[in-house]
Amino acid sequence: MTQSAEKPAFTIKGRHVLIALVLFFGLIAAVDGYFISLAVKTFSGQVAKNPYEAGLVYNRTLAQREREAALGWTATVERLDGDVIAVRVSDRAGAPLDGLSVTATLERPATSKGQRTLSFAGAGPGLYRANAAPLDGAWDVHATIRGPGDALFEADRRLVSP
């Protein structure tokens, strides 16, 4: 009998799997490296389109925070029963402040849809309330408190309702 000289069928061995894995992850690392270098080379360093104007606004914000610190007021924003938002305002000594004008902007964290302005009414010593129905989900509250003269105080809070 004569043996035929047929080639044995190809079988995947361990070294084939190792080579395939190394090539695959090497390709991924090379593409990631290319994208990282492209991102670093093309980044201008400017985050804002108008950095000078953004800097001026930031300087105004810092000046406002200094005026607020000089007032010594504290304000807390909280959700009460149902869809009622309350703002409590007190002076440096912790005494409640009455006779203030309180307004707030209520908006979603990720979109401007549903943005609205609330006007608060006095509801006790240092307590101001407004109905914000419906108040489901996450909302950012930016309260503006105006006092006698040019006294201005701002408070921010994120409210999350189930």
Image (spheres, rainbow, N blue to C red):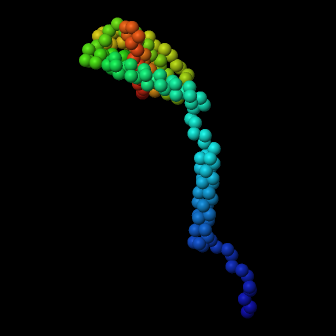
The residue lying toward the viewer, choosing from 121 and 96, is 96
| Residue 162 visible, this angle | yes
Q: Nearer the viewer, residue 82 or 140?
A: 140
Residue drawn 55% across and 22% down? 113
Q: Position of residue 41 (x, y in %)?
A: 62, 47
Quarter the N terminus occupies: bottom right
Q: Is residue 79 visible?
A: no
**Extreme residue toward the bottom, this view:** 1
**Count of picture labels:** 0
Q: Nearer the viewer, residue 40 or 128?
A: 40
The residue located at (55%, 23%) in the rendering is: 112
Classify residue 19 by image quadrant.
bottom right
* Rendered location of residue 98, percent (x, y): 32, 9
Residue 39, above or below 90:
below
Of the 4 image quadrants, the one containing the C terminus is: top left
Image side of residue 96 versus residue 34, left or right: left
From the top left corner, tell me how far across and down residue 111 is, in percent. 54, 26
The residue at the point 59 percent across, 47 percent down is 40
In the rendered image of this protein, does residue 35 appear above or below residue 99?
A: below
What is the quadrant of residue 31 in the picture? bottom right
Residue 94 spot, x, y in % from top left:
26, 18
Indicate whether 124 appears above or below 139: above
Q: Residue at x 60, y 53 (%)?
A: 32
